[in-house]
Amino acid sequence: MKFFLDTADLKEIEEAASWGVLAGVTTNPTLYSRIGGKLSDFHAHIKRICEIVDGPVSAESVAMTRDEIVRDGRELAAIAPNVVVKVPTMIEGLAATKQLASEGIPVNMTLCFTVPQAIMAARAGARYISPFVGRFDDISEAGLDQLGDVIEAIGNYDFTDSTVGGEQIEIIAASVRSAHHVAQAALLGADIATVPFATLKKCVQHPLTDRGLDAFLKDWEKVANA
Ligand code: E4P
C-alpha cells in the first residue's frame, strides 16, 4: 500500500516528502480553505505541490455540470503532468470522467461510498477511486466494511479497458482518521491510503519503540563511559 498525504498545507507536504515514503497528495476544497487558500492562488498552489511531490496530486473540480467539470479538468491537468482531477461521484461527474479519461486525463472519483458507485466510477474510466471510511463511521456505519466491499468488488473485474491508458485502477482509502484505519486498509488490500499529516505521523510511532530506543540510548551511554 502506498501513502498519500491528505492536505493542502505545503509545510506538511514538504515534511512528509522528506521522510521518503510519500507517493502522492490529495486535496479538496475544505483542505484548501483550511489553509486560508484564495481562489486566485489555487492553480499556483497546486503547481507548488506538484513540484514538491514526485507522484499524483489530486486537485478537485467544484463544478456541477459535465461541461464545466471537463473544462475545469483540462485546466487543472495543464498545471503539471502529475495532476489528477478529482471529480465527485455523481451523474455529471461520471459523464465528465468518461470525457476526461478519453483525453488521457486521469481522474480520482471522490465522495465514493458504495460498491455500485465504485463500479460506475470504474466503468466511466476513473484511474483512482476514493471510498470514504471515516464519514461512514461518523454516521455509525462501518466504514472499513464498506471499503472492503469496494476493494473486493473492483477486484472481481478487469477494468483496464476503461481506465486511462489501460492502467490498473487504484483504490484510495480516503477519509482516514486513525492508524487503525490505515492498518485495516492495508489488510483489506487498499492500493493507497490518503492520510492527514497528524495521522501519518502516528503511523510511525509506538510507545514500545520509544521505550526501546530510550533503553538502548541509556545502555549505550554506559558503554561509552565504561
Ligand atoms: C480524500 O480524498 C478526501 O479529501 C478526504 O480523505 C476526506 O476526509 P474527511 O472525511 O476526513 O474530510
Image (spheres, rainbow, N blue to C red):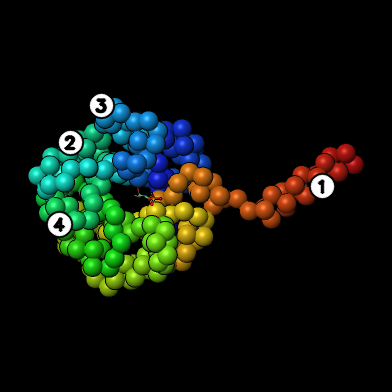
Q: Is residue 108 above or below residue 154?
A: above
Q: Provide the secondary structure element on which disc 1 rests.
A: helix
* Residue type for callout 4: Ile
Q: Nearer the viewer, mark 1 or mark 3?
A: 3
Q: Residue furthest left?
A: 67
Q: Could you say where residue 180 lies in the image, as x and y percent from the top left?
A: 52, 60
Q: Position of residue 42 (x, y in %)?
A: 28, 31
Q: How far, Cα to Cα, is label 1 from label 4? A: 63 Å
Seen at 25% across and 63% down, the residue is 118
Residues under labels 1 and 2: Cα distance? 58 Å
The nearer-to-camera label among 1 and 4 is 4
Work out which quarter of the rendered image holds the N terminus and state it.
Answer: bottom left
Q: Who is closer to the viewer here, 211 or 53?
A: 211
Q: Please tell me which of labels 1 and 3 falls first in the chain.
A: 3
- Looking at numbered disc 2 in the image, what kind of residue is underneath it? Glu
Q: Are circles 1 and 3 on residues that touch, CB within 8 Å?
A: no
The residue wearing badge 3 is 40
User: Contact (CB < 8 A) between labels 4 and 3?
Assistant: no
Q: Which residue is mark 2?
A: 75
Q: Residue at label 4?
A: 91
How much space separates mark 4 and mark 3, taking CA atoms? 28 Å
Q: Between disc 4 and disc 3, whose residue precedes?
A: 3
Q: Amino acid at mark 1?
A: Asp
